[in-house]
Image (tube, rainbow, N blue to C red):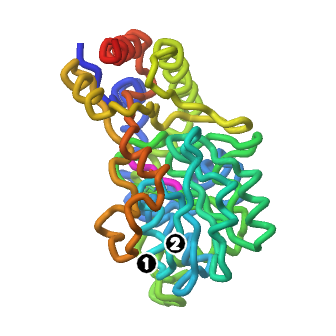
Amino acid sequence: MQVPFLSFAPQHQPIREEILEAVGRVYDSQWYVLGQSVRDFEAAYAKFSGAGYCVGVANGLDALHLSLVALGIGAGDEVIVPSNTYIATWLAVSYVGAVPVPVEPSPITYNLDPRLIEAAITPRTRAIMPVHLYGQACEMRAIMEIAQRHQLLVIEDNAQAQGATAHGQLTGSFGAANGTSFYPGKNLGALGDAGAVTTNDEGVAQKLRVLRNYGSQQKYYNEVVGYNSRLDELQAAVLSVKLGYLPEWTRQRQQVAAWYDTHLRGIEGLQLPVAALGSTHVYHLYVVRTARRDALQEHLTAAGIGTLIHYPVPPHQQQAYAHMNIRKGAFPIAEELAATSLSLPMWPGMTEEQVVQVAEAVRSYFD
Ligand SMILES: *Cc1c(COP(=O)(O)O)cnc(C)c1O
């Protein structure tokens, strides 16, 4: 029996009628951009995130980019980013003309290490962008305290951790503006591209509503050089339906992770995910680490098991950032994570039988 890396079937099949009904309502409404479905989803997602406001945008990268624009970060500024993240975090900083300043993660949680942040702060530093990587909340209490002490803004990249908490507070509710993604494979996924910013600041929310819609509040009157980055009605309607199921899907992801923990325990040379004290993990991905990563991946592929590497090349070693002239070995933890990490199959509704099959294939490699 094959085990794919990801299957949408257990999520999407039971709600097929409900989703198609929501799509039908938008179809019949004859209103397709910035209407009631977007407003309803924004209200529901703000509530879900424990944030005052939510502004829907076209995708997660735009959510991060427009957050930086709305907060006035630009040329000459530096923004602290993790050395291991999806490249979107860095790109958003580059788009506004600021410089991404990488800081290494904890080798245990893979999230930005608060103990290393202060050494990277300079007079030009304006903000810290923690990424709740793989679904685990960063150590937000420590990060917020550092930000406060140095008068820095915090912009969470919450693309992978919708519904996670740090010290009981939801991700996406800490920073001045926080971006999330509803790319189909994310924990809350649209049927295409979509994203949102969450914030507790009404002024920031209002700026974002103007920025996403051509810099305009009144049609054909443009106050600022804005963007076209609107969440569309169809995606918003789909997301509103799916949001209702997200808590249950999160519990299912956590159950799959618990099964993996049980069935993979005690394999020498295989490091399992660890949730930090005070943080919850919503397992966007279940990432294991081993020095023999490439061979393990080949073994699993041959056994019919899908895996992926998140991420094979850290941003500072991408050709896109060659101009920064960061030497190899400058960020050894990020480089080691890139060489040793492997994401195992993970989706809500994955069965214990499937988890056991993956675990046995992993074990047979190490035996
Ligand atoms: C997916 C993702 C993004 C970007 O989201 P898109 O919707 O694909 O633009 C940003 N940051 C992280 C950490 C992500 O995983």
In-front residue for pair 256/265 = 265
Residue 77: x %, y % from top left: 57, 81
In this view, 89 is above or below 127 = above
**Do tag 1 and tag 2 residues touch (Cβ < 8 Å)?**
yes
Quadrant position of the C terminus in the picture: top left
The residue at the point 81 percent across, 68 percent down is 149
**Prevailing SS of the magenta stretch:** loop
In this view, 38 is above or below 288 = below
Question: Which residue is disc 2 drawn over?
Answer: 66
Kind of residue at disc 2: Leu
Residue 231 seen in the figure: no
Tell me which image quadrant ligand 1 sits in: bottom left
The residue at the point 53 percent across, 13 percent down is 262
Judging from the image, what secondary structure is the residue with disc 2 in?
A: helix
Judging from the image, what secondary structure is the residue with disc 1 in?
A: loop
**Residue range of the region highlighted in magenta in the rendering:** 180-184
Comes first in the chain, label 1 or label 2: 2
Question: Which residue is disc 1 drawn over?
Answer: 227
Residue 102: which disc? none
How far apart marks 1 and 2 lie (CA) works out to 9 Å
